[in-house]
């Protein structure tokens, strides 16, 4: 008999599975609730955590409980009028400001990219090839993440065989799935070559030094310099970035997150005249309000008059019409 479990598991992303399992365990084990739950117990659970958890976390807990009940064939207690009214009351009595990642500014991106390049060259010269591999990988990861606005989990899903490079011109890649791609259709993305802090050159340099033609684009590297067959864990992306930021001399390197690359690019694009539709098409957002959360219109990303001239993409084409390298001052 054909085993359906791999397909059922694949329908729900691993990150979602882990977070839902944690949420259900918190309700049942740590809080002492019973499953299947009643609408009254769910409402009391929300009320008791109203001043401890954010409204977004409470919504996530409700989604996890709803999924558990659906999977087990029970009625969903989270959709009753009582639960919805309690959640609405919590929003009214405990308003909160959404926390946003600190955007990585272009000057900071350049500072770290230059340091990683210099450090990798020095490590190669000194015969420290493990350190050289780390620096080349981290530089490509950071520049790719910034210029395409990738989430941390999206960076872990990139594979070398899905990347087509044309040094000096651009890069075309395929992302198998993402947070907003509910049907797992994947999407093709394109990044133009830049004259400075170029993700195309950085990725090409990393692929060459890694001597690989397939597998995850950003794998683990052990202490002996062996590259893993699995990608970096999504929870490792932030430590990798913070390590590079700290070594490059960025102040308060530990305040940056994986979303700092994504928000940094969105703010940069907004400050340089990209319209929201072009930005959404380039990054892969489907909703305007999602894109606007990443755009910091009140804080110019670059000094007045500075123009990196990365052209706004159309829906189907992200490379410059000329095909030539785009200039970054």
Image: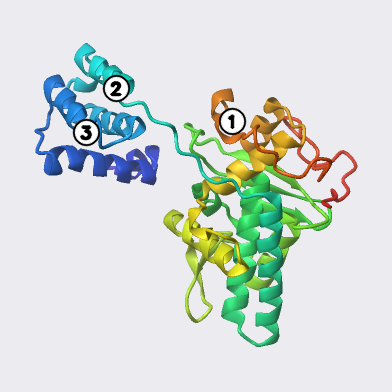
Dot 1 or dot 3, earlier in sequence: 3
Q: Which residue is mark 2?
A: 93
Dot 2 or dot 3, earlier in sequence: 3
Question: SS of the residue at dot 2?
Answer: helix
Check disc 2: other Cα within 10 Å, few if <14, some if 14-19, many if 20+: few
**Is residue 272 left or right of 206 when viewed as pictured?**
right
Q: Which residue is mark 1?
A: 291
**Is residue 246 left or right of 53 when viewed as pictured?**
right
Check disc 3: other Cα within 10 Å, few if <14, some if 14-19, many if 20+: some
Q: CA distance from mark 1 to mark 3?
A: 30 Å
Which residue is at 25% across, 33% downward?
51
Q: Which residue is mark 3?
A: 49
Q: Position of residue 263 (x, y in %)?
A: 59, 41
Question: SS of the residue at dot 3?
Answer: loop
In the displayed image of the protein, which residue is found farthest to the bottom? 126
**Quadrant of the rendered image containing residue 129:** bottom right
Decide: is 304 above or below 204: above
Q: CA distance from mark 2 to mark 3?
A: 13 Å
Circle 2 or circle 3, nearest the eye: 2
**Is residue 226 left or right of 68 when viewed as pictured?**
right
Question: SS of the residue at dot 1?
Answer: helix
**Is residue 232 left or right of 120 when viewed as pictured?**
left
Indicate the quadrant containing the N terminus: top left, top right, bottom left or bottom right: top left
Residue 160 visible to the viewer: no
Decide: is 300 above or below 236: above
């Amino acid at each position: 008999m054909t085993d359906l479990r791999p397909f059922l598991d694949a329908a729900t992303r691993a990150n979602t599975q882990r977070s839902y399992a944690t949420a259900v365990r918190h309700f049942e084990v740590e809080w002492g609730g019973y499953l299947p739950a009643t609408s009254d117990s769910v409402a009391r659970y929300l009320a008791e955590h109203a001043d401890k958890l954010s409204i977004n976390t409470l919504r996530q807990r409700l989604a996890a409980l709803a999924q558990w009940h659906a999977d087990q064939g029970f009625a969903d207690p989270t959709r009753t009028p009582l639960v919805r009214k309690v959640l609405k009351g919590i929003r009214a009595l405990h308003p909160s400001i959404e926390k946003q990642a600190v955007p990585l500014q272009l000057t900071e991106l350049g500072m770290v990219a230059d340091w990683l390049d210099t450090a990798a060259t020095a490590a190669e010269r000194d015969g420290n090839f493990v350190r050289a591999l780390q620096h080349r990988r981290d530089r490509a990861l950071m520049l790719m993440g910034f210029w395409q606005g990738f989430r941390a989990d999206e960076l872990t899903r990139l594979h070398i065989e899905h990347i087509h490079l044309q040094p000096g011109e651009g890069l075309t890649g395929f992302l198998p799935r993402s947070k907003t791609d509910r049907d797992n259709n994947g999407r093709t993305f394109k990044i133009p070559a830049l004259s400075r802090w170029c993700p195309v050159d950085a990725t090409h340099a990393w692929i060459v030094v890694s001597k690989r033609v397939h597998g995850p684009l950003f794998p683990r590297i052990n202490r002996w310099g062996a590259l893993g067959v699995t990608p970096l864990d999504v929870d490792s992306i932030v430590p990798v970035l913070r390590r590079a930021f700290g070594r490059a001399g960025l102040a308060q390197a530990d305040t940056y997150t994986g979303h700092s690359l994504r928000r940094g690019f969105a703010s940069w694009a907004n400050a340089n005249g990209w319209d929201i539709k072009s930005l959404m098409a380039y990054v892969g957002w489907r909703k305007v309000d999602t894109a606007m959360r990443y755009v910091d219109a009140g804080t110019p990303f670059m000094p007045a008059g500075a123009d990196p001239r990365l052209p706004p993409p159309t829906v189907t084409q992200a490379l410059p019409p000329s095909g030539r390298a785009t200039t970054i001052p």
